[in-house]
Amino acid sequence: MRLSKISMIFDSNIFIYSALDHPKFGEKSTKLISKVESREIEGYIPTIVLNETLHRLMIAETIKERKAKNVRDALFILKNDRETIPRLEVCWSEINKILDMDFIILKEKPNTFLNSIEISKRYSLLARDAYIASFAEDYSIENIATFDKDFERVDFLKVWKL
């Protein structure tokens, strides 16, 4: 008898820490992502996670390459220097890697956003976190890969300790 795979929704911090080789969380994130590639885990990514991952990687690359001092400076450069975004490389490469992996991309259902409002209020979550939790609820996914402890308040999600 074959056991069913674990279904797991992924938060953006997993992809960001892996891409940036974060000193504390990078290796753990990369190992977890590889479990989706080896099909040990069935991995799901809401579209909002792809958006947030790309956004944060654009900022990180701008800080690194353009020597912006902080997020505010990086955002100023990204918004005002029209040559910066097309010249970015790492963020595009990383997002394409994710899209080429065996993750299932989750699209918003008709009530995903409205449900996220209730989830935000019920569990005292910021809007993006509530939106991710709403995707999990909509698709009946009980496990989440994240380093964000706020998800521990959500009783229908099991936060994987990485």
Image (cartoon, helix red, strand yellow):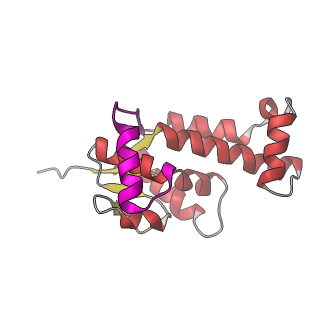
Residue 39 shows in this picture:
no
Percent x, y of residue 35: 41, 52
- Report the number of discs: 0
Residue 56 as seen in the image, left or right of residue 34: right
Asked if 104 appears above or below 130 in the picture, the reply is above
Percent x, y of residue 114: 37, 40
Asked if 112 appears above or below 123 in the picture, the reply is above
Name the residue at 39% across, 46% down.
116
Along the viewing direction, whichever of 133 and 161 lies nearer the viewer: 133
Percent x, y of residue 76: 83, 43
Asked if 91 appears above or below 63 in the picture, the reply is above
Along the viewing direction, whichever of 104 and 71 lies nearer the viewer: 71
Residue 155 as seen in the image, left or right of residue 52: left
Residue 138 belongs to magenta span: no
Name the residue at 58% across, 44% down.
52
Name the residue at 43% across, 51% down.
130
Asked if 48 appears above or below 70 in the picture, the reply is above
Name the residue at 76% across, 47% down.
61
Locate the C terminus and report the quarter of the image it occupies.
bottom left
Outermost residue, left side:
1
Residue 127 shows in this picture:
yes
Residue 123 as seen in the image, left or right of residue 148: left
Magenta residue span:
102-128
Along the viewing direction, whichever of 81 and 30 lies nearer the viewer: 81
Percent x, y of residue 47: 48, 37
